[in-house]
Image: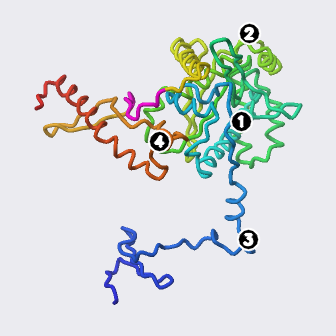
Amino acid sequence: MVEKVNEEVISEENNGTHFLYSETEGVIDSSEKEFQPKDMENAEPDTWSVQKIWNDITEVEKREPKVRDYISFGNIGKDDYWSRFMKMKGIPESNPFEGRVIRIFQAGETFHDLVKGVFRSAGIYIFSQDDLNEKGERDWSEIPATKTQLKQFGAFDILVGGKPDLEKAMRWIETSDMTEFQKDKAIKIAEYFSDKFPNGLKPMIYEIKSINSQAFWGKKNYLHEAYPHHRHQLFGYLKANHKNPEMLKRVEEAGIKVDSIDEGRLLYISKDDLVMAEFPISIYNESLIASYKNDIDTMSGYILRDEEPPKPDYVIFNKRKTLPFQKNKIKYKVRGCYVMNWEVTWSSYFTLMTGFKADKVKDFEDTLKAEIKEKNEKIKAKILAKVGVITK
């Protein structure tokens, strides 16, 4: 049977399977057999390709679970104490991240290196706990344990500050593997900092977070104060290094003498267009002081008492999320509504927590729709009442 197509449709024969494509709408008809991309993924074993080599060598190593007697700075501020408890107790993950997801995290290191290069170019790069020291080991940030609080442990991205060293910056730029265009930009950055801040810059700890452009632009309102767990993470690094003699010595060697490191910056960088958003974090922020202590006290209490925390709520109130709706042909928009808890679906213990298999996340989400709708309908009713709209 010959299928009839119009002039805008392209037909293609592929291994006996007939597909119809529309230039504007994609596949409009096909057999049950799926189209297979003609790449090198399934090439013969003795045939080499960059695709196969790259994907093979970037496979990630699975880490065995282990009991931890410390709280990672990167987990502070996350409300899912149950998953944090499971991980600290060494419970095997029911939903470990796929290699692809972990590689996305690893790809963030490229952007860390990019920002490090900018600071080096400016002559204000001091130190990174990602780097190895003279002993070939890593340095760490640590807040010692007490009778009621577990140790807090981790590594910050970059310490910057001091007097811009233009000569040192120029030497680094010239010996770097940057292109001439990049070197020209780097020189201008170095000259700018040297000219504008001849007396030096106060030391600050920078934490770099790379995110995709959809999260950066599509959810820009989420970033008006940075993500809570990122704020707590950086606050922890400041708390650990605020009066750290070793850190203060490094700052002094960079050309400026201070008695504390009291400020940091969260720097978000869009992976697709390299646009940045930057947020200051202070060691003296009273709100962070209180919420940080509450988190450490709470998590430490569960571990020290060997008490399993309650599972997180599957539906939570998001004060940043916008809820648009319409009544009597008038459009309304309210900031703050109920949503599904992202920490649940992203938990590496999702199946153990909810009973749903990894490939049934959509089914799990469907079970929450009615509850979310009911809660948000109450919000709508309150808003309409405030503006004088009577609802049944």
Q: Which residue is mark 3?
A: 48
Whether pointer 4 and pointer 1 mark residues with C-beta atoms closer than 8 Å, the reply is: no
Q: Tell which residue pokes out farthest to the right in this image.
A: 135
Q: Residue furthest bottom?
A: 1
Distance (Cα) linking label 2 and label 1: 25 Å
Mark sitting earlier along the chain (4/2): 2
Q: Earlier in the sequence, mark 3 or mark 4?
A: 3
How far is mark 2 from mark 3, CA to CA? 57 Å
Residue 116 shows which numbered tag? 1
Q: Which residue is mark 4?
A: 345
The residue stretch that appears in magenta: 310-320
Q: Residues within 10 Å of mark 3 (few under 14, many from 20)?
A: few
Residue type marked 3: Trp
Q: Secondary structure at mark 4?
A: helix
Closer to the chain start, of discs 2 and 1, is: 1
Residue 165 horizontal/vertical position (percent): 79, 26
Q: Which mark is residue 276?
A: none
Q: Amino acid at mark 1?
A: Lys
Above or below: residue 284 compared with residue 133:
above
In screen coordinates, is 375 left or right of 257? left
The residue that disc 2 covers is 259
Residue positioned 41% across, 31% down in the render? 313
Camera-near label (3 vs 1) is 3
- Circle 2: residue type: Asp
Left or right side of 371 for 157: right
Mark found first going from the N terminus, 4 or 1: 1
Which mark is first along the chain, 3 or 2? 3
> Which residue does the image show at 17% across and 24% down from the upper left?
385
